[in-house]
Image (spheres, rainbow, N blue to C red):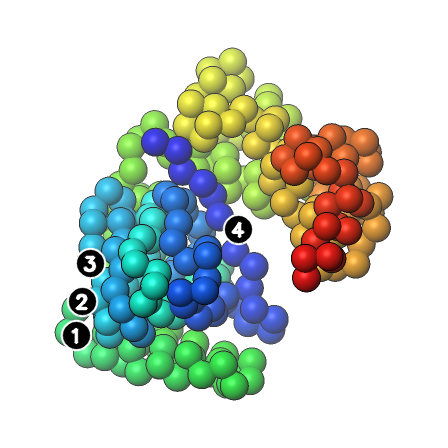
Amino acid sequence: MKYEYETIKYNDNLPAKIRLYDENSEELFSNYHWHKEIELIYVIKGKAKAEKNSEAFDLAKGGVFLLNSGEIHKLSGDCDDTEILMIQLSYDFVKQFDGQLDAHNFVVKPASKAEQLIKRYMCELSDNSLSSFQQYAVLMNILHVMFTYCLRERQISLYGNCKVNFRNAKLAMEYIEEHYREDINLNVMANIVGLNPIYFSKYFKDSTGQGFNAYLGSVRLKHAIDDLLNQGMSIADAASYNGFPNVKSFENACKRSYGLTPLQFKKQQLRVS
């Protein structure tokens, strides 16, 4: 089984991503993935199914579902009649309110006072007319509920109850996401997770479906393309800022993934939009 590490891009001025998904949101349903953020899902309309650490859950209208940091999960269902509000809270932001958070997790029990309160606040957040300041205030109310009613001693490791042999891959993927702009190589990464480089190379590919260098390149490409399209960076600056040794390597990575150079890809996206 291959698991993708997801990078969450937060809303402006907020320590979270808040997104309302409906039948027009192609990215609502997902493959198995994980992220560092704490995720809350509120089903406004319709129904969906979630899988968390190999356990299946039916998400009915009005239900709240919580995913702790690092839990492997996927979401599926009938997108023709489904509307979901999803909040992905920065783990580092939440952790500043509890220095021992790594030893705890959050549990929202069905029909509990906590679920009712969180549901009320998430209904407020579904109003897209709220300012960033108002959204921040509601997020703090949700955190107050979580810390007051939902905090439990963690019975499993920070990286969930996934197979032991995947934990090092999760550590490596998280490290890459945080340090992809730096000069990372196979030997450095193997040393960080405490494995022999030859073993780590095979292990990482078996765990993720990509070799280490290909995976690192895909992470750099993802961020470089985002900077190129959304931050107004030049091709040279996007390449340099995101860890590519030169423009040529950025172009080659883009051609492998999209069949286009970065310039061609940018022009294509501008035409589409």
Q: Give the quadrant of the C terminus.
A: bottom right
Asked whether 131 or 138 is in front, the reply is 131
**Residue type at numbered disc 3:** Asp
Say which label, 4 or 2, has the lower sequence index: 4
Q: Nearer the viewer, mark 1 or mark 4?
A: 4
Say which label, 4 or 3, has the lower sequence index: 4
Contact, mark 4 vs mark 2 (Cβ under 8 Å):
no
**Would residue 267 appear left or right of 66 to someone viewing this image?**
right
Residue 49: x percent and y percent? 25, 55
Q: CA distance from mark 1 to mark 4?
A: 31 Å
Q: Secondary structure at mark 3?
A: strand
Q: Nearer the viewer, mark 4 or mark 3?
A: 3
Q: Secondary structure at mark 1?
A: loop
Residue 146: x percent and y percent? 31, 71
Q: Check disc 4 and report the residue beneath it.
A: 7
The structure residue drawn at horizontal position 84% and vertical position 50%, both measured from the top left corner, is 234
Say which label, 3 or 2, has the lower sequence index: 3
Q: Check disc 3 and report the residue beneath it.
A: 58
The structure residue drawn at horizontal position 20% and vertical position 58%, both measured from the top left corner, is 58
**Residue type at numbered disc 1:** Ser
Question: Which labelled disc corresponds to residue 179?
Answer: none
Question: Which labelled disc corresponds to residue 112?
Answer: 1
